[in-house]
Image: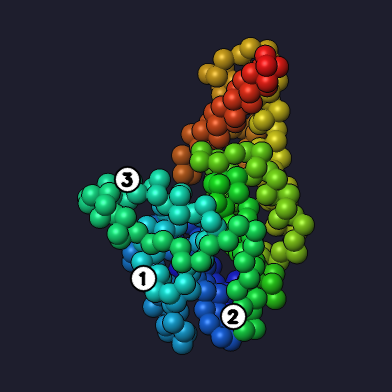
Amino acid sequence: MFTEVAPGVFSVASRFVDGKNGIILGSRGALAVDGSNYDDEAQATADFIRQKGYDPNRLALTHGHSDHIFGAAPLAQGEIFAHALTPGVIQKQLPRFAEMRGISVEAAAARVIQPTVTFRDELWVSLGDKTVWLFPTPGHSVDGVSVYVQEVRVLFSGDSVVTGIVAAIGDGNSEVLETSLHRLMTLDIDVLVPGHGHVLYGADKVTDWLTWQGAYLSQVRAEVQSRLARDQNTTAIVEAIDFETFVGDRLPVAQHGMRKRHQATVMKIIAEQIEKRSGETDFRAK
């Protein structure tokens, strides 16, 4: 469950769609990154931090989606860092949290974790010999944040970067995510811990994946634009933008319902482009 990816920095495996959380240990404290969908996983993370001689009293959230916060209570014993938009994202998740726990929405609101420190542009956290930089990388979600450990060049990307599934944008925007990926490409990253999938080791592998994920979104969008211009309907467009051509052997089609995930991404990009065309038409009409 715990893999040391750099001195004092750990990837923490989750059973939710090959999820990845994190732990950063410094000379003056520890910081957990995301809290899992499951109480037992977050409890194991808290126990691990204690075994290393630290208190589990700092938690950074990469975003407010359920699989990153619903089990996080064992790690929410002190400061909880998140983007300023995360409380709103958590609020939207409350009905699902309530349904999963079999409780009322009001009871869910009382039980789910909430950030104690929020920011919009960036936040720096000093752990002594390790400096952690939190900064926005939206697109998967409006509140997306990446967590960079400066001294060892490790990035926890949350779901802004995923290596085990195609880019998920159901609650976000493909063009915004593509911009975030370009921002990440300007950093020196030796190890990238994604929100879901395998850890990337080495700057070349990190750059390769960031480039591919951005190109995937861009190529799908270009094909959608071309087919919308020819007045093709949604069903025809989704069928034409097939998994084999646009994903190929980058990801195994039989894993995690990958074909359906790809189709969902295509459908979201279609919706984005239709909305964009509609807005341009309205503007011209005025």
Query: Badge 3 is on which residue?
Result: 95
Q: Taking 263 as reference, is 162 above or below it?
A: below
Q: Quadrant of the N terminus?
A: bottom left
| 120 and 194: which is toward the camera | 120
Label 1 vs label 3: CA separation?
21 Å
On residue 74, the disc is 1
Residue most toward the top?
231
Which kind of residue does numbered mark 3 sit on? Pro
Using residue 266 as the reference point, say whether residue 218 is left or right of it.
right
Place of residue 134 in the rendered image (x, y in percent of width and height, measured from the top left): 61, 64
Q: Amino acid at mark 1?
A: Pro
- At horizontal 52% and vertical 78% (from top left) the residue drawn is 30
Residue beneath the point at 63% across and 70% down: 124
- The residue at 75%/61% (across/down) is 187
Q: Which residue is mark 2?
A: 127
Q: Are marks 3 and 2 in contact (CB under 8 Å)?
A: no
Q: Mark 2 or mark 1, which has the lower sequence index?
A: 1
What residue is drawn where x is 70% and y is 45%?
A: 179
Marks 1 and 3, the one that precedes in the sequence: 1
Residue 115 marker: none
| Residue type of the residue flagged with mark 2 | Leu
Disc on the earlier residue, 3 or 2: 3
